[in-house]
Image (cartoon, rainbow, N blue to C red):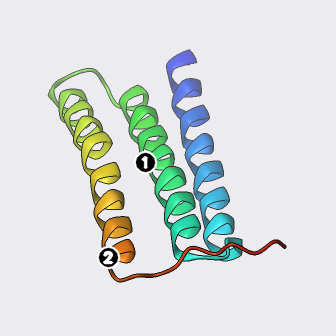
Amino acid sequence: MIVAGLGWFFFILAAFFAILGTLGVLFMPDVYSRLQAGALSGTTAVVSLLIGSIFWVDPGPFTGRLVVLLLFFLVSSPTATHIIGRYAWRERIIPWRGSR
């Protein structure tokens, strides 16, 4: 019962981060801010979803696969975000410097 409650908590947390990331991508002014908002919220949403899935499933080999998937995502998501941001910088996309 408590383990299922923890699973639901992390699922709701993942939905919260996904909604915040969507709002961040919609309202940020330039590509770098949008990239940061989307990457940070996307990473935390997927990590929360995977942690919730770990609590939700029965212990066994599938739990180990979820842990490996979580570790892979923790490494690959920031790396991909860095590559996209670096490409934008090399293409001379200028960061936004105004005020709202």
Mark 1 or 2 closer to N-term? 1
Secondary structure beneath label 1: helix
Residue 18 position, x and y percent, is 58, 57
Q: Quadrant of residue 49?
A: top left
Front one among 40 and 46:
40
Residue 12 position, x and y percent, is 62, 43
Front one among 41 and 10:
41
Q: Quadrant of residue 74?
A: top left
72 vs 33, left or right, is left
95 to 51, vertically: above or below: below
Residue farthest along the right direction in this orientation: 100
64 to 70, vertically: above or below: above
Quadrant, the C terminus:
bottom right
Q: Disc 2 designates what residue?
A: 90
Could you tell me the amino acid type at mark 1? Val
Q: Could you tell me which residue is drawn at 44 percent across and 48 percent down?
A: 43
Quadrant, the N terminus:
top right
Q: Could you tell me which residue is drawn at 15 percent across and 27 percent down?
A: 61
What is the number of the mark on residue 99?
A: none
From the image, state whether disc 1 or disc 2 is nearer to you.
2
Residue 96 position, x and y percent, is 64, 75
96 to 76, vertically: above or below: below
Secondary structure beneath label 2: helix
What is the number of the mark on residue 46?
A: 1
Could you tell me the amino acid type at mark 2? Arg
23 to 11, vertically: above or below: below
Whole-angstrom CA distance, mark 1 to mark 2, is: 29 Å
Q: Could you tell me which residue is drawn at 19 percent across and 27 percent down?
A: 64
Crowding around mark 1 (Cα neighbors within 10 Å: few <14, some 14 to 19, many 20+) is many
Residue 86 position, x and y percent, is 33, 66
Q: How many marks?
A: 2
